[in-house]
Image (tube, helix red, strand yellow):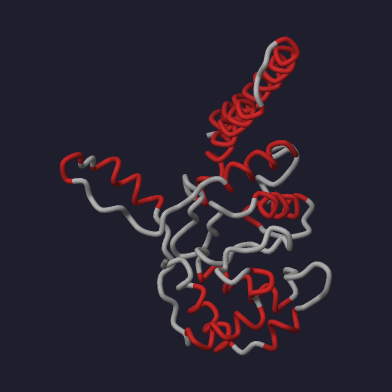
Amino acid sequence: MVRKVVDICFLRRLKRAVRAWYFVSLLFLLSVTDVTGTEQQELDMEYGEEINQTCAGCHGEYGQGSIEGEYPRLAGLDAVYIAKQLNDFKTRKRINIPMIPFANDRELPGDDVRIISEYLSRIQLPTKLQPVDEENFDALERLHASKRVVNIKDYPGDIELGRKVYKKECVSCHAKDGYGNKKKKAPQLAGQYSEYLLRQVKYYRSGERLHDEEKDDAELFNEFSDEVIDAMLAYLATLDDN
């Protein structure tokens, strides 16, 4: 087991050394050849896919998270928001025990944070499977397609009450459709697992996590009854049905 861990660490260091040599060579080539920005971005995204192999152990191959909400969906979230959370994990501004082995400058240096954040933000997950093409049916392809589908299951609560509270308290930042606001750095809530969102609400209530870094608004969440929180989660669970 020890030998295996050592071998893995050695291979990771070797791969980083090769990448460093590669990018130095690329910079030289850029000075004598015409390489477009789009092509450079594509190289970065290939590396992003490689980084994601580590993330996939918890968040899924496509950043889809886990159905029970233990691990959140990352696919499609704003790249700036993802990077912010990763950097908060690194500085322990946001405490997350499972992320401690990964969120450090050795395992996830600054450039890697930027690349994996952009990679995950570009993944678009459907909310339902496309109809079966019986003439060209491929069981393996269908299996992979099903893994990409994320549709939040119904959550018990008063949807109409949730709609009213959401529109009054949340829509100005998280948008009418629940898909967030980049300018306000507010993440999308639609398409995120209800159990995960509920856990974050508990962290906000206790002060373990700040909802708004410009002001301590833990009291806001404590003012909401459990019934209201459930109602908002029930409403949010419907936003990815369209």
Q: Residue at x 75, y 50 (%)?
A: 87
Q: Residue at x 65, y 38 (%)?
A: 115
Quick one: 231 or 10, which is closer to the camera? 231
Image-based side of 119 in relation to 110, left or right:
left
Q: How many numbered discs sit on the rendered protein?
A: 0
Q: Residue at x 62, y 29 (%)?
A: 38
Q: Is residue 191 above or below residue 30?
A: below
Residue 35: % across, % down = 65, 19
The extreme left residue here reads 135
Residue 172: % across, % down = 68, 73
Residue 152: % across, % down = 44, 67
Q: Quadrant of residue 21?
A: top right
The extreme top residue here reads 32
Q: Is residue 80 above or below residue 193?
A: above
Q: Residue at x 50, y 63 (%)?
A: 191
Quick one: 131 or 36, which is closer to the camera? 36
Image-based side of 210 in relation to 238, left or right:
right
Q: Quadrant of residue 46?
A: top right
Residue 214: % across, % down = 83, 69
The extreme right residue here reads 214
Image-based side of 227 in relation to 203, left or right:
left
Q: Quadrant of the C terminus?
A: bottom left
